[in-house]
Image: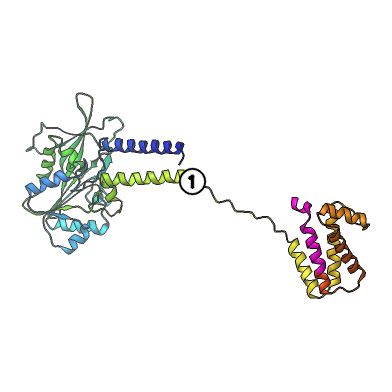
Amino acid sequence: MSKKGKIYSVLIALVVLFIVFLEMTKPKDINWFPSYATHHKIPFGSYVFNAQLQRICKNITPVERPPFEYLKDNDIKGTYLFYNGGINFGEEERDALLDWVSNGNHLIISAVDFEEQLLDTLHLKTKTVKTYDNFNKEYQVNLVNPQLDQNKTYKYDKANTFYYFNKIDTTQTTILGFIDTYRGPNGKIKDSLVNTIKQPFGDGEIILSTFPQAFTNYFILQSPNQDYTAGLLSYIDTNKTIYVDTYYKNGKKFYTSPMYLFLSTKSLKWAYYIMLIGVLIYIIFEGKRKQRAIPIVRPLKNQTLDFTRTIANMYYEKGKHKDISSHKITHFLDYIRNTMHLTTSNIDDIFIKNLAARSNNTVSDTQTLFNHISALNSKSVVDKTELERLNTLIEQFKSHNQWKKKQ
């Protein structure tokens, strides 16, 4: 690696280590996901509520199955508690729950909003609280039970959407709580809207609340908000079994993703991130250093020599020695003209002397070669021995040629 490449590598390594240091030392972001899960300690989990409920009531049964299946397989009595951001029962499940309530049981559902079919059955309607003039998103919730302390106020400041009951059946419905919208530094109440109601159903009872945040860690741990949640629990008969739904929850109890182990453990998570960064750096540098292989374009092969050899072998095998000798003589004379620049139209003693001098051969050898050529030209038939002799004399002549050696 070049010196420049080493410097770049060190700088990149330092930058990566600096980023890792910053990430490991920065405060962990708060998870505001509204999970409502009983095992979550995040702000919108319900770990604190679940712990307090088990403290005051010994007969707690978490239900991890759909209510329809659970009620079908079990003959139970008591209170069924649902709380989540949204709960949407199907027709069969809703009918099964209502039949179960009508047999003398209690149903408590707390959700941001409810399905239309359930509201129609109970002759209720809901509406969204106007939030466009409530910039701080501050609300106040209260319970109307005279046995509770009416001087306490319970505030909540993390709601993006709030619903209230804008239509109730006054002959069957009991109002349990209000949501108050207020503004200004003096906390002046603007509107009091119904958000918690109770209604008999057969021999049982149904309680609905549009404020599931009352069961979250964030709300309960802000004193005196725990008293509001305790007030809601006062409507539950703690002498009977309380079935707490964990099926209709936004948060998961079991994580099925194979990446959860890596991303939930800080050291493994950063090991995974560093590996991805390393792979990215490797791809960038390798992509610059290595390019696609350039194919080798081989030049066209000169087939002239092979062709000549093929023709010569064909003549030789057929015994056409005369034709071969004529071609070799013609080729040899052409070689003299092109290589030694002598004319071959008149072969005499002067020509022999000049050719011998230029080709670095003796006059005697040169004369012998041309005497043989003259003899073959005068014959109509040439045998194999004479042809081989011609070839030998020509090769010997060329081997002394100083012009040939310079090329």
Position of 58 relative to 182 (above/below): below
Q: Amino acid at mark 1?
A: Gly
Nearer to the camera, 330 or 363:
363
Q: Image quadrant for the N terminus?
A: top left
List the residue tagged with mark 1. 287
To which quarter of the image does residue 322 belong? bottom right
Q: Residue at x 69, y 57 (%)?
A: 300
Q: Residue at x 19, y 60 (%)?
A: 70
To which quarter of the image does residue 394 belong? bottom right
User: Is 135 covered by the magenta stretch?
Assistant: no
Mark 1 crowd level (few <14, some 14–19, many ≥20, 10 Å Cα): few
- Please give left or right for residue 45 compared with residue 149 in the image: right
- Please give left or right for residue 330 compared with residue 277 in the image: right
User: Is 398 covered by the magenta stretch?
Assistant: yes
Query: Residue 284's x, y, as percent?
Result: 45, 43
Nearer to the camera, 126 or 241:
241
Query: Residue 2's x, y, as percent?
Result: 46, 39
Range of magenta residues: 389-407
Q: How many marks?
A: 1
Residue 211 visible in the snapshot: no
